[in-house]
Amino acid sequence: MKKINITITGALGRMGKILIKRISKNKNIKLFSLTDLKCGKIINGIKVQKNNLEAFKKTDVVIDFSRPKSSLEILNYAKKFKKRVVIGTTGFTRQQNNLIKNYSKKIAIFKSGNMSLGINLLEYIVNIISKKIPNDYHVGINDDHHRKKVDFPSGTALMLANAISKGKNKNLESIKGKIFLNKKGNLQKNKVNFFITRKGNTIGKHSVIFNNNIENIELKHTAFSRELFADGALNAAIWISKKNKGLFNMQDMFGLK
């Protein structure tokens, strides 16, 4: 099998650095280029540069863990050169998500708020439970990350919330309840509440609670290392390298749809 050339954007960020390390352990892929807002540093013999034509022209797949504005810039380059893109960036607005969908009509895009198998299995199970559970159960999502994470609710929390809304056959906006950031709160009837913590160095803890005051059902996932997300993104890059166009996610890769 010919090695797949990979470009990492946001290369100097937390995930970028881990991806660079994990690529060396995967025999199917090769690090081709690196981009970041800060440029000039040389890593593994490759100079970090800003997003430009040369960085993307001869790569096969771009793995993007940057910021939404940068992600859209990258997609513009990818469209020009017909490159595949794996997006692990979160915090997109509704308008930006619509732009991503438009790009996917021309190129293959793999986008997920969380690249771990466990979270995507949790999303799948939550959707099934939401279809069956009575309406008198209140629903809450716990979303715990490190203090430097900017967006909230996180992409993972929104994935889980969307799984609930689809299970209930409702629009997420119509059932989205209160957001409690670093404070306590109560579950609201017929709403999905978010209980968010941004403290310490937590990599990622998420749970979905179904409660009707006489019983409590809690489904939980804890990430112990960011290598979990890096390996998921690299597997996604290999998987999408065979696609020409379309918008895909972990559910597609694992055959959970």
Image (tube, helix red, strand yellow):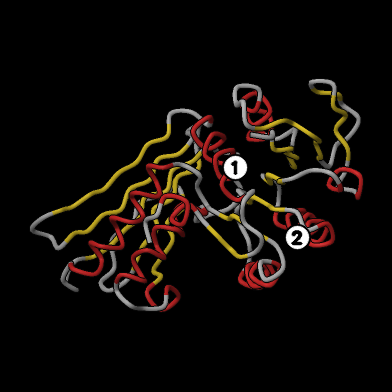
Q: Is residue 11 left or right of residue 240?
A: right
Secondary structure state at the residue bearing disc 1: helix
Q: Which mark is residue 27?
A: none
Residue carrying label 2:
72
Q: Residue at x 57, y 35 (%)?
A: 230
The crowd level at tag 1 (other Cα within 10 Å; few <14, some 14-19, many 20+) is some
Q: Where is residue 73 in the image (x, y as percent from the top left)?
A: 80, 58
Check if mark 1's residue and mark 2's residue have beta carbons within 8 Å. no
Q: In this view, does 170 lie to the left or right of 230?
A: left
Please identify the quadrant where the N terminus is shown: top right
Does 188 sit above or below residue 31?
A: below
Please identify the quadrant where the C terminus is shown: bottom left
Q: Which amino acid does label 1 sit on?
A: Ile
Label 1 to label 2, Cα distance in Å? 22 Å
Which residue is more in the foreground, 24 or 195? Answer: 24
* Quarter occupied by residue 134: bottom left
Q: Residue at x 84, y 61 (%)?
A: 80
Does 252 sit above or below residue 144?
A: below
Q: Position of residue 120 (x, y in %)?
A: 40, 50
The crowd level at tag 2 (other Cα within 10 Å; few <14, some 14-19, many 20+) is some
Does 186 sit above or below residue 242?
A: below
Residue carrying label 1:
238
Q: Which residue is drawn at 47% across and 33% down?
A: 202
Q: Position of residue 94 (x, y in %)?
A: 61, 71
Q: Residue at x 70, y 35 (%)?
A: 13
Q: What residue type is labelled 2?
A: Leu
Mark 1 or mark 2: whose residue is earlier in sequence: 2
